[in-house]
Image: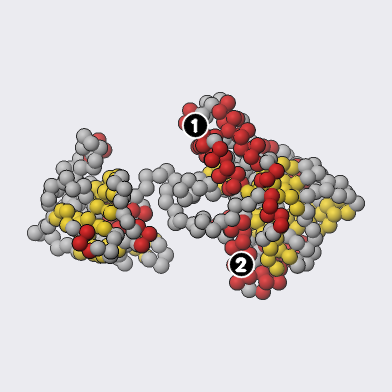
Amino acid sequence: MNVSFRRVYGVSRLLPRIFARQIATTSIASEAATIARARSQTEQVHISDLTTSPKHQGKIHELLDPRYEDGGLLEFGTASWDRHDEKGLPRWGAWGIPIKLQTAKGASSVTTAPNFWLRDNCRCSRGYHASRGSHRDRWSERAGDGHVSKYAWDWLVKHKSHSLYGHHPKMPMMDRFYWGSKIVSRPPTVQYDEIMASDKGVGKWTEKIRRYGFCYVDGCPVSPEKTQELLERIAFIRVTHYGGFYDFTADLTMKDTAYTNLALPAHTDTTYFTDPAGLQMFHLLSHTDGEGGASLLVDGHKAARTLSKESKSAYDILCQTPISWHASGNEGITITPAKKMPVLNIGHGVNNTVTQVRWNNDDRGVVSLNGEHGVSAERWYDAARKWDAILKRKEMEYWAQLIPGRPLIFDNWRVLHGRSAFTGKRRICGGYSEYFSM
């Protein structure tokens, strides 16, 4: 249903006037009773329709706390502590408008929308370029111009969060498939010819990567050139200190355990970058005069969910405690992130959902004795021990042998990878691509 909401900027002091109504998302129009009104005799006002989406059915939204006086202007506060009353609720004032959100269960919270914030985020065609999602106005031209802005209630609620992580559009997380060792019976697969034939085939491929975190490609020609063309169907290849597209054997050309025949535990790559590589592809071109080298995959998102259920405190520590990471094995090369990073990142998550796992014990730096949020090194090690034990559970591990003609691509932000030791000579090609390319 639609209701009216007025918001006007005074030319001199940006004093707010408001036409406040209770906004009910039920189908009964009578529930949207007026709770307060304020009119200005000197300014024209613009009435806009506020449309609430079906997802908010059963909730009641109020623009103002009912206790505010009818038509009252707010006191002008000069400091942040002047902007709230003894109960911690926002005062009326020239600096902004208080907004109350009340759920059907009775819980409520009050936030404030400063005038300049409202003006800066006006969605009208004068100040906002809808097709690009960008601002048109200059900051210096906005204040005190008497402009009338319109806002959808759902938009205000969407941007109400005070989270340090900010707001990002909700990703369709519900259809993600969290897996363990049993995925061996039916791993996600797409045909090479289908991917190369059309963008629809690429979409089918990337959808499986998004849903499962990894995918095989059957029928790929056994050549590095064709493998590179395949990876570039998603996006450009990311260049690192290892180069771009790689084609290597276990000859220790680079000082990295990947260039050996040793067993590798489950880990994520490039933890030492501020923005770790998003996607990685492996294509086994040949394996002669030996055996072993089975590939290991672990669903890091499932492992994080398991840790959260079994030990919420350990989960919180790994989400909130940034630690150092580094790569310095090769001569003349030392790489560290721009800042310390936690093992589990919910920076772009929805409902505290982990979106990035950063875990490689070989690349981990020193854990501070007294870390962030009062977390001691002892507590961090205890949390890390629980996390590592979950990763090594048999039911979490998916083992499979790579074969020529069947490249594997996986989400390096979600899926940890490793391998068993091997003998003989293996030749593998592949490369990194960016996560945002998904």
| Amino acid, disc 2 | Lys
> Tag count in the figure?
2
Place residue 133 in its image quadrant. Answer: bottom left
Badge 2 is on which residue?
204
**Residue 22 appears in the rendering:** yes
| 277 relative to 209, above or below | above
Q: In this rendered view, identify the residue nearer to me: 89 or 176.
A: 176
Does residue 321 appear left or right of residue 32 in this picture? right
Quarter occupied by residue 384: top right
The N terminus, quarter of image: bottom left
User: Where does the C terminus fall, quadrant-wise?
Assistant: bottom right
**Is residue 32 positioned above or below 325 on the image?**
below
* Quarter holding residue 198: bottom right
- Mark 1 vs mark 2, foreground winner is 2
For label 2, count other residues whose C-alpha is less than 10 Å away and answer few (under 14), some (14-19) or many (20+): some
Camera-nearest residue between 384 and 34: 34
- What residue type is disc 1 on? Glu
Q: Identify the residue at image location x=91%, y=51%.
A: 289
Circle 1 — which element?
Answer: helix
Q: Horizontal and vertical percent for residue 395?
A: 68, 45
Tell me: 244 left or right of 51. Answer: right
Which residue is depicted at the point 78% across and 45% down? 420
Q: Residue furthest toward the right?
A: 289
Q: Is residue 237 above or below residue 125?
A: above
Which is more toward the observer, 330 or 85? 85
Could you tell me which residue is drawn at 62 percent across and 59 percent down? 209
Q: Measure the alpha-carbon separation of dots 1 and 2.
A: 42 Å
Q: Is disc 1 surrounded by few (<14), some (14 to 19) or many (20+) residues within 10 Å?
A: few
Residue bearing mark 1: 372
Image coordinates for residue 51, horizontal then vertical, percent = 30, 63
Instruction: Establish if 53 lies above or below 255.
Output: below
Q: Residue at x 29, y 46 (%)?
A: 106
